[in-house]
Amino acid sequence: MKIRMQFIFAVVFLIVIGESLLVRAQEEATGIDSYTYEQNESCLKCHGHKLYFYYNEGVGHDVKERMNPYFIIDSAEYYASNHKNFTCTDCHSLECDDFPHSGQMRMEPKFACLDCHAGDEAYAKYDFEKIEVEFQKSVHFSRHSEDFTCSMCHNPHTYKINARTNENMAEFILYDNEICLTCHADISKYQLLTTKENPNVLKTHSWLPNQVLHFKKVRCLECHTEVNNDILVSHNILPKEQAVKQCVECHSKDSRLMASLYKYQFTGKRSKIGFSNDAMLEDSYVIGANRNYYLNMISIGLFGLVLIGIFIHALLRIIIKHK
């Protein structure tokens, strides 16, 4: 009997240890601690699906309901985001744990980025305070003031850093442009801020040659923001009248793309003598920007030799004719 009990205890001990190791391995692989996951699952069992169930005491049985699409959180996107280790109640009221939720919760104030990220040395390198100053200069803030919050562009449930971490230029250009298009191509969100008609992006950019190629290879920010060397991504969105429309601003040796789109990816590869940019040759070709100093000099030299040859030839013809 004693041996049997020892065997049972040993099996239970091994199971507990196995589960603990499994949980630890899962945490290391996903970067998500088990406590956060368990806490959030109580919310995501409803808010992670189009349909949810609850027991209705009034009718005495389970009821199936449709979730408001604006309140559905994609758990896969959330756990890939920068806030994946936050529990829902880190940002939302603790009353969320109660169901049905109080209608008052819909009016609870939402946290702004600086409520967490300001004044913390751990985030100092990201210059959130400078970003806030730049944003307050932008047309978004000047026209919509406090109504235009960080979360209008940076959904806290899905946002993840791309410019610093993604080496695939096409992917992070697409990601950044989709942030702009969540308003400028979505009438329902656009009209949260204005009653004006949402302009058609394709029509307003009809002047742009090779429109599709430009949309794939550069971000909206390249033409619609003021370049700022102190922060990773400029947040001073300019009025449409001040948007870049001069081709030479990008298609030149001193392309503004090197101060914006390629700013961090290739800082170490920039050449002081204008290889403008050997870095850009890796991912794209920008007419007028991908220039090699030595090839330029060779081309000028060859052109000069041709002119000298023509001059000598003409001079010899004149001398021979007069003889």
Image (cartoon, rainbow, N blue to C red):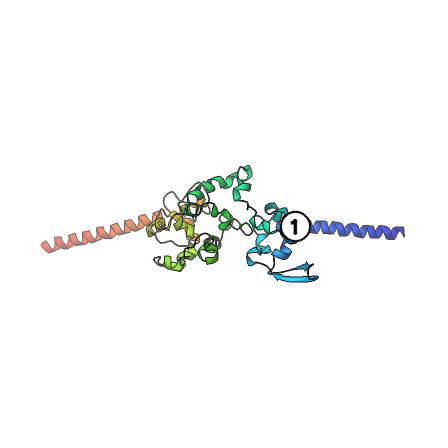
Residue in the picture at 32% in, 49% down: 296
Q: In the displayed structure, does residue 9 sit left or right of residue 309? A: right
**Residue 103 horizontal/vertical position (percent):** 59, 52
As drawn, the residue found furthest toward the left would be 322
As drawn, the residue found furthest toward the front would be 58
Q: Is residue 90 visible?
A: yes
Q: Is residue 127 visible?
A: no
In this orientation, which residue lies closer to the viewer: 187 or 105? 105
In this orientation, which residue lies closer to the viewer: 94 or 127? 94
In this orientation, which residue lies closer to the viewer: 162 or 7? 162
**Residue 156 horizontal/vertical position (percent):** 54, 49
Q: In the displayed structure, does residue 48 sit left or right of residue 270? A: right
Q: In the displayed structure, does residue 318 sit left or right of residue 26? A: left
**Residue 245 horizontal/vertical position (percent):** 34, 52
Q: How many marks?
A: 1
The amino acid at mark 1 is Asp
Residue in the picture at 22% in, 52% down: 309
Tell me the element at label 1: helix
Circle 1 Cα neighbour tier, 10 Å, few/some/many (<14 / 14–19 / ≥20): some
According to the picture, the residue beneath numbered tag 1 turns out to be 97
**Residue 180 horizontal/vertical position (percent):** 45, 53
**Quadrant location, the C terminus:** bottom left
